[in-house]
Image (cartoon, coloured by chain):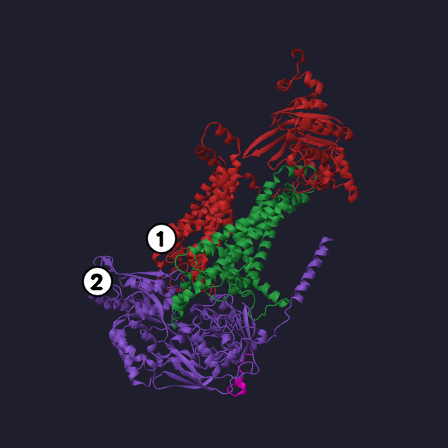
Chain colours: A green, B purple, C red
Amino acid sequence: MNLNYVLIRFFQSLLIIFIAVTINFVIPRMIPGDPIEAALSTKIAISGTVSVDVEEMAKIYRKKFGLDQPYLVQYVNYLKDLTTFNLGVSLVNFPETVATQLLSALPWTIGLLVVSTIITFLLGTIIGAIIAWPSCPKWFHVLVIPFMLTSTIPFFLLGIILLFLFSVVWAVFPAGGGYSPLLIVDYDLESAIDIAYHAVLPSISLVFGSLGAWVLSMRAMMISVQGDDYILFAKSRGVSPARIFVWYCMRNALLPQFTNLALTLGTVIGGAVLVEIIFSYPGIGSILFAAIAGKDYFVIQGIVYILILSLGVCLFLIDLLYPLIDPRIKYSD
Amino acid sequence: MCQKSFLKFVLVILGVYFFWGHNVYAIEKVAREKTLVVTPWSDTTGPLKNAKNWHIYQIGNKNQREIGHKTIYEALMYTNLNTGELVPWQATGFKYNEDFTTVTVNLRPGVKWSDGVSFSCTDVKFTLEMLRDNSDLNYAFIYQEWLKDVVCVDDLTVQINLNKPGPRWFHMNLALGHENHQVILPSHIWGDKDPKTFTNYDLEKSWPVGTGAYALVSSNAQQYIFDRRDDWWGTETGFMDNPAPERIILVSVGGDESMAQMIIADNVDSGHPLQPGSFKAATKRNENIRSWNRKGPVWGAADGCGYVLFMNLAKEPWNNRDVRLAINYAIDRKQLSTIGYENANYPVVLPYSSYMSGRWITPATQKIIDKYDRDKTDHQLVAKHMKAAGYEKNSKGLWSKNGETLKVPLRTPQWLAPLAPPMSVQLKKAGFDASAVLEPEASSAWVDDLKVGNFETMFMVHCGSLGEPYQTLKDLHSKWSADNKCNSPIACSRYRNDEYDKIIDKLEKIPGSLDDENYKTLVNQAVDIYLRDMPEIMLLEELHVVVYNEKYWTNWPGGENPYAAPYPCWEAWNLIVHNLQPR
Amino acid sequence: MKKIPFTLISGLTLLSSIILFGYLGPIFVDISNYEVASVMPSQPPSSELIFGSDSQGRDMLSVTIYSIPQTIKIAIIAGFFGIFIGLSLGLLSGYIGGFTDTLIRITSDSLMTVPGIAILIIIATNVDTMTVELMGLTIACIAWMHPTRTIRSQVLTIRENNYIKVARANGLNNFQIIFFEILPNLLPYIAACLVASITGAILATVGLESLGLGTQDDHTLGTTIYWARRYSAILRGQWWWWGPPIAIISLIFVSLFLISLGLDKYSNPKLSTLNSKKRRSGNLENSQKDSPTANVLEISNLTVEFEKEGKRIMALNQISLNISENQIVGLIGESGSGKSTLANAVLSILPENGSVTNGNIIFDNKFVGNLSEQELNKLRASEMALIPQAAMNSLNPVLKIKDQLLDSLVFQEKDSVLKNKKIVHLLNQVGLDGNVADKYPHQLSGGMKQRVTMAMAISHKPKLLIADEPTSALDVVVQKQVMKTLKTIQQNLKCGMIVIGHDLGLITQFCDDVVVLYEGRIVEFGSVEEITQNPKNSYTQHLIDSLPKFDFQNA
């Protein structure tokens, strides 16, 4: 692989991440009002019995978190901290650091998301390709209709329906959580099975909820590719229909699909947040939700940063993968 | 060929995962029926926080509020809020001096820390003075205000000297029963540490070290595991048998729905209270589930709080008693409970919780309540009071004066949301231009507004009714509020009444006791003024539908056996652990 | 006027019924029952309460009817705002280019890197009192990014079109160009973007509302779901509380989906092929000709028709033609005269909408029309070969030349070493170096690509070789080389050959006989000498006349 190519892509990604991160810095600070005092006051007001001088505590916190500095200084510190992954401290759950919170939740989200996305992409691409092939049997079309219908429902709503059907009405799957309470999570078979069991409903929501879009876009791609000249030529050469289907049509339709994957990753992450909340899945979504409710400034920032970073990394990786599947890019410098 | 080597590769990875990845410090399994599985209080959802930080007093660190933690750090005494009785534990007794400036506490002989060192006055002195001397610790402000010093008469006799008379100081701070988490720390471990940064967590050294019957064996964001010790001082001194659960697991919970599912599946024994509706649905699917009361519709247990509608008494028209009374008579408290809480709570007119209303609503107090008869819905009385305040109904049937309708914006912080819609409808029916104004979930603008007096009416909770009337009646004393600040939400209503203030001042100086006629008389005087003026409108008692799953454990505290107040965040949960029996 | 697809109509109908249900509902139902304490709480659906009631005493039917217009309002505000901004930025960015373009592109790209939901959450938590209108504006904050991108890329494509250059040359200023030339062409994309925008907006608003960040006082479909979850309606089996909103939301999405499918079909009719193509079964007994001849190809009375937008167009009209071994026939005619159609018909690779309506094609004494697909494939792989027009696009971009050649050899060799040798040999035969085998098509020049297709054509020693405008896309010097190679091939194979072209000069140099096609009919047929010296048809004369002549006598 060309070093130039990698470097250019790398710096492009860095630039985009930098801009996104700056926006991430700016938006929460446009919050009117003092988040620290607000967070403290709410907690105190609810408990009622203990009266604490909120202003004093707020002052201490503010100094600790450097929120009394001018914005420019804060920004520089912010950037410095980001590079060392010092994401700050949770306001609400002081002194727990944001990084600790996220680290415990990240594996769950990654597991759920990655597995679901890969399954959706593969299934959607294959089904979409088969549907687009003129010799596709009719029964296949009928089989696919339920999938298309379920994909029109946003996947977190689909999650609600699944939760209702499979946990409340028929108690087949657990109604939430990442693993069962008694399980001591460990690297063994029992844990793996338990975790998989709990992950079924959330991942089905994610998969079924987005399958339709992939099927349709792959189908559209395949149809437009089938009109290309080289398909006709291959047919005229007597190349077997199966080979044309896979190596001439699918292979070429895959490229724009890959781009779509990159573009929709952002939405997928968003959807996963909502699905996690519905299923009380111990991932980043639940933390984000709680942080918003508690106005936990730094946690929100930290999560958004991780999301930006991972999206940027994914896009970068996809950019790197591109030459592997499209030789036109590989060899044209 | 490619496929075969790929398969081999996968198998190798799996092998590594399952054999090498296996935790070397594997914890032994304990049978489910010997394990107590619990979840945290309802304001703690999601992954468990601060798993590696066991500093009890660090501001913001709420670990001590969780069930397992209370089995490590015990209390000098526990309070059974339901009856007001104290349960001696690390201490055997206490005594105030004449003017309530010194309290002498007697420690129980034989109490030991988990590493074998004896529990003694040194530890008490160290802890209380540490709190006095370090202002950015939790509760430090209490000790800065009250504590002069602690003197160790001998190893088992502690003399706490206060800065000013504190007739109820010991009850409030060291007889733990609600959200006062002031436990004693081992001075031989904490003595040389920096109180600002010490994390008190090191499993190899068995930190955290406490006197309790359990020890922490595992702590991460999903679970805390506490195992019963063999060498608890209680069994050694013959104080008490070992508690029945061999293991306690605290697991994270996602919320109401997720708690319900877990308890229905018998995966959890108690913890996060449920909403009345969820509770009913859960009991339908699992008959082992019960709450404080075995029968409804009032299932739940008290928490010392009541829902209240209070108004900004420094503003028109709320400073007009007739207007307040009119609003009171427009309200149907029973219907508020029916719609907002599915009939699960009691109407109240006084800021008394069922912790003490049973004993403190004496016949004399009841007479006063009956005299004023505030708990009733009567549109004629509404009209009478509104007319007396100078209002007339306009063409749309709304009360107005000088061409303006009386607007009642019912500001509602998120956790009180169920109250707003029904009350808004009730007020509208009585002719008030009412609207429900729900504060957004993440906003705390209402806190700032309360402070500066920028509000009309607001729903709130009036809390603190733990053992005696003074605890809640005091909030309306004028000294707690000024034009632009107020010490507690209730005080923010800015009630001004000299007569009332004088009574409260007197009450402050004497301990609350049903044997003290003087105290009772003063209380009734205050109650009379309160009900006459209605500076705030109490609505319903706040009850929490605590849940117990009796599949594996019985002898929970309940209406029929109220030996402790069952909140996962309240210290007395240690009593519960010691009382549970296997099924 | 194109036919409006069924999906578009059904989608619009569904969407309008939902909207009408929401806006006209209050006429039939007492809408004030959406307040709490209006009816008995927690009632399942019955004859009095068609949708039941929730646990706070709201009549769910009233709630549903009330909330539909609110959700629609948000979607429309967000969708239209998003499109408006997206359109403006996209036009600016695509048309003006340069620094503006880079700026806009980088901003939208980096904003797209931040997951939309995070931005929405942050904005929504800071709005003091959320109203329906504010919600719409909040979502518009991220709804503009996708349209900007799409519109921009379309504008870039359109901008390079010739008619834009013409317009500019005619003196239209930028403003006029954008409004009168570019915008009309963007309409299908704008429509598609609008549908996508609205879909995304509803998705985002329902998402936010489910998190509790929606409007507080007003009911929308999403907030109803939020309250249902908050009161554990799922656990309690009160499906009538959250069921209707989810059902309505799904129906809205289904209708939007149908609309977008319809719009797609409307602008790109090829996408309407959802039917399976029947596999040709073949009729082998009847495929053999009774009296075999030495002709490689016999076409008699062939008529081929196409169906386009409901009309039938006749591409070939009663064509009769015979080609024998070692005969080179040139097929000449102007664009659209049916030359490629003839080639495709012979190979039986007519597109979906074309069919043979009359006549026969007999190849090597077999009735082509009666052969099964499998047998046809065999024929194409071994006996017939096509050298396609526009070799630029005739090679699969993602496979190496070697692999594509192997596809042609699949019926012949099994041993891989032999295969590689054969490939190099083949390439040499068409004048290419053996290392071409490891290259990808885009690394070769036009002429090289054409030779590769020739190599593919001859790889299996066909009896009939059809060269469809083999040199049309090449420059003159290369043309000559390619034709020379072609000649060599034909001499080696001694196959029957059809050379299709529109350059009479080239054809006459190369072929034995010439067929002239005009509007699907053969208007002239004869040897090269006959045609050039004695053309019988005026069109032929016309073609001859248009050949450049060097008149040395008048020099």
Q: Position of residue B251 (x, y in %)?
A: 53, 70
The residues colored magenta run: B233-245
Give amino acid for label 2.
Answer: Tyr
Marker disc for residue B391: 2
Residue C26 tag number: 1
Q: Residues within 10 Å of mark 2 (few under 14, many from 20)?
A: many
Helix, strand or loop at label 2? It is loop
Q: Could you tell whether A184 is left or right of B481 in the image?
A: right
Give the amino acid type for the residue marked by disc 1 in the picture.
Pro
Q: Classify mark 1: helix, strand or loop.
A: helix
Q: From the viewer's side, name the closer residue of A205 and C519.
A: A205
User: Relative to residue B312, is residue C507 depicted above or below?
Assistant: above
Badge 1 crowding class, 10 Å Cα cut-off, few under 14, some 14 to 19, many 20 or more, is: some
Kindly identify which chain the residue marked by label 2 belongs to: B
Residue placed farthest to the top in the image? C553
* Residue C308 x, y percent position in the rendering: 56, 34
**In the rendered image, the vertical position of residue C546 relative to residue A83, given as above or below:** above
Disc ID at residue B476: none
Q: Nearer the viewer, mark 2 or mark 1?
A: 2
